[in-house]
Image (spheres, helix red, strand yellow):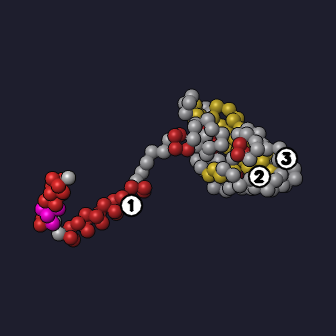
Amino acid sequence: MARYDDMVEGFTRRLAKTVSRRSVLRALGGFLVGAAAVPVLPVKRGHAAGGAPDDETSCDYWRYCAMDGFICACCGGTARACPPGTEAAPITWVGTCRNASDGRDYIVSYNDCCGKSSCGRCLCNRNEGDRPLYLPANANDYNWCVGSKSGAPYHCTISRIMGVATK
């Protein structure tokens, strides 16, 4: 053990003769600043980060590319059906989403489910292809429940495939 102690002592004395305190503090500060910057570096976030590509409760699900609202699959319904006690608003907005598994683009209709207070779970706000409010068919910022029979409050949003997009 004495040999190890002598080796560490020799290394420490050589280091103390050649390196100043300021340079050690500068290097330590540079390391800390660099370490703090690591979380803000760009990272490719694929399906592994946000769930499986066919997970209806994940905002990364391909059908939700123009979604703005709470996912009904988290609120007692499915991606295609409103939860019990709610009704789908007859007025919708549409988007075109690419299904990575088959490489095709699909026209997707987004219906707000109305009749209960807001679900509050699984907020998804992707807005791909969203248009200004003066183009209502492609704008997702309206309260579409005003078109329902009862004009009831918004609960969640479903996505229905309307067909394959043609070029």
Please provide percent x and percent y for residue 46.
50, 41
Q: Residue furthest top?
A: 102
Q: How many marks?
A: 3
Identify the residue position indicated by label 1 in the image: 36
Crowding at label 3, few (<14), some or many (≥20) Cα neighbours within 10 Å? Answer: few
Q: Is residue 24 visible?
A: yes
SS category of the residue bearing label 3: loop
In the picture, measured across the screen, residue 113 lies left or right of residue 49, that is right
Q: Residue at x 20, y 52 (%)?
A: 1
Position of the C terminus, as image quadrant, is: top right
The magenta stretch spans residue 13: yes
Look at the image and give the residue range highlighted in magenta. Answer: 11-16
Disc 3 to disc 1, C-alpha distance? 48 Å
Q: Amino acid at mark 2?
A: His
Q: Nearer the viewer, residue 31 or 68?
A: 31
SS category of the residue bearing label 2: strand
Q: Residue at x 13, y 59 (%)?
A: 10
Disc 3 to disc 2, C-alpha distance? 10 Å
Q: Earlier in the sequence, mark 3 or mark 1?
A: 1
Q: Amino acid at mark 3?
A: Gly
Q: Are marks 3 and 2 in contact (CB under 8 Å)?
A: no
Please provide percent x and percent y for residue 157.
72, 47
Please provide percent x and percent y for residue 34.
33, 59
Q: Nearer the viewer, residue 11 or 82?
A: 11
Crowding at label 1, few (<14), some or many (≥20) Cα neighbours within 10 Å? Answer: few
Q: Amino acid at mark 1?
A: Ala
Which numbered dot is residue 85? 3
Identify the residue position indicated by label 2 in the image: 155
Please provide percent x and percent y for residue 129.
59, 47
Q: Residue furthest bottom?
A: 22
Instruction: Tell me if residue 79 comes above or below residue 115 in the rendering.
Output: above
